[in-house]
Image (cartoon, rainbow, N blue to C red):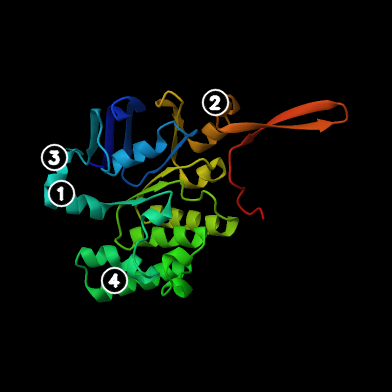
Amino acid sequence: MDNLVFEIKDVHFSYLSKFPALCGISLGIKQGQKISIVGANGSGKSTFLQLLDGLIFADRGTVNFYGKSLSPKAFIDLKFSREFRQSVGFIFQNSDVQLFCPTVKEDIVFGPLQLGLPKDIIQGRLDKLCAALKLDGLLDRPPYQLSAGEKRKVAIATTLISEPQVLILDEPTAGLDPLTTRVIIDLLVRENESGKTIITATHDLHIVEEISDLVYVFGQQRSIVKRGPAETIINDAALLEANNLVHIHSHRHKDKVHAHPHLHSEHRIGEH
């Protein structure tokens, strides 16, 4: 039990107390695991991630972090709140949510400065991230001038520089070109190899095998319909089709129309 980072038991959550978003979610996430949450729009993926990050709280059921319940009361404890925020990093699907300073460099170093880390340590971490994410030419630019891929890399850097032990990512490769996607996937794999727990919600099933030890499929009833290794999940055509994770592509050949299922994806890795 000591290595159980998150323990979620029978969690329910509704928006405005009338729009169900999660219905009876139960699972455990161990230290050092790579977990992916897949599901169609509206299946509750983003809501689930926000519960894990203590941004919203369950209506019913429990979300525990190393045995301590995540609740509004828990975050009143400033010591716990600080330790949790330092341990758990969240990367939003919309990078603009995380970028609010005049320059990229100020955005990246904002977190560790607030945590009171020495400037030489911050600089060392900044240099390392700039090399890994190829950010050197962006540091003096305002975030609003960046491309979507550049913003995503900067948003990831703003989280990684505090060196959290848990990374929670909401659609980290959505809308990105193959090269930027490759950089992000390689970074996540390295972070996991260093011992970090990686939790990702994604529509892009082509990246799931690389970033997952275990995959949870969320269905339209906002509950878990299946869990298993990535290879098992992505090769279960009936499961994917039933949960709107493939689309049917039709084409005409001579006088007949043929239909084939395809994985939902922004692109395949390496395609241009």
Q: For the residue carrying disc 3, how many other residues have a C-alpha within 10 Å: few (<14), some (14-19), or many (20+)? A: few
Q: Find the distance from the CA under tag 1 to the CA under tag 2.
A: 40 Å
- Which residue is found at the position 24% from the left and 55% from the top? 86
Q: Is residue 1 visible?
A: no
| Label 4 to label 1: alpha-carbon separation | 23 Å
- First along the sequence among labels 3 and 4: 3
Residue 183 has which mark? none
Q: CA distance from mark 2 to mark 3?
A: 39 Å
Q: Earlier in the sequence, mark 3 or mark 1?
A: 3
Q: In the image, what residue occupies the spot 46% across and 25% down?
A: 220
Pointer 2 residue? 239
Observer-side mark, 2 or 3, equals 3
Please report whichever mark, 2 or 3, sits nearer to the chain's N-terminal start.
3
Q: Three-letter amino acid code at disc 1?
A: Phe
What residue is at 55 percent from the left and 54 percent from the top?
176
Specify the quadrant that holds the C terminus: bottom right
On screen, residue 90 versus residue 232, left or right, reads: left
Q: Earlier in the sequence, mark 4 or mark 2?
A: 4
Which three-letter amino acid code belongs to the residue tagged 4? Ile
Tag 1 residue? 80
Mark 3 = which residue? Answer: 73
Label 2 packing within 10 angstroms: few (<14), some (14-19), many (20+): some
Q: Which residue is mark 4?
A: 122
Query: Answer yes or no: do the residues labelled 4 and 2 have beta carbons within 8 Å?
Result: no
Q: Is 71 drawn above or below residue 22 in the view shown?
A: below
Asked if the residue under mark 1 is in contact with the one under mark 3, i.e. CB atoms within 8 Å, the reply is: no
Callout 4: few (<14), some (14-19), or many (20+) C-alpha neighbours within 10 Å? Answer: many
Residue 177 position within the rendered picture, expressed as x and y whole percent measured from the top left: 58, 56
Give the distance between the C-alpha atoms of the residues marked 3 and 4, in whole angstroms: 32 Å
Upstream in sequence: badge 1 or badge 2: 1
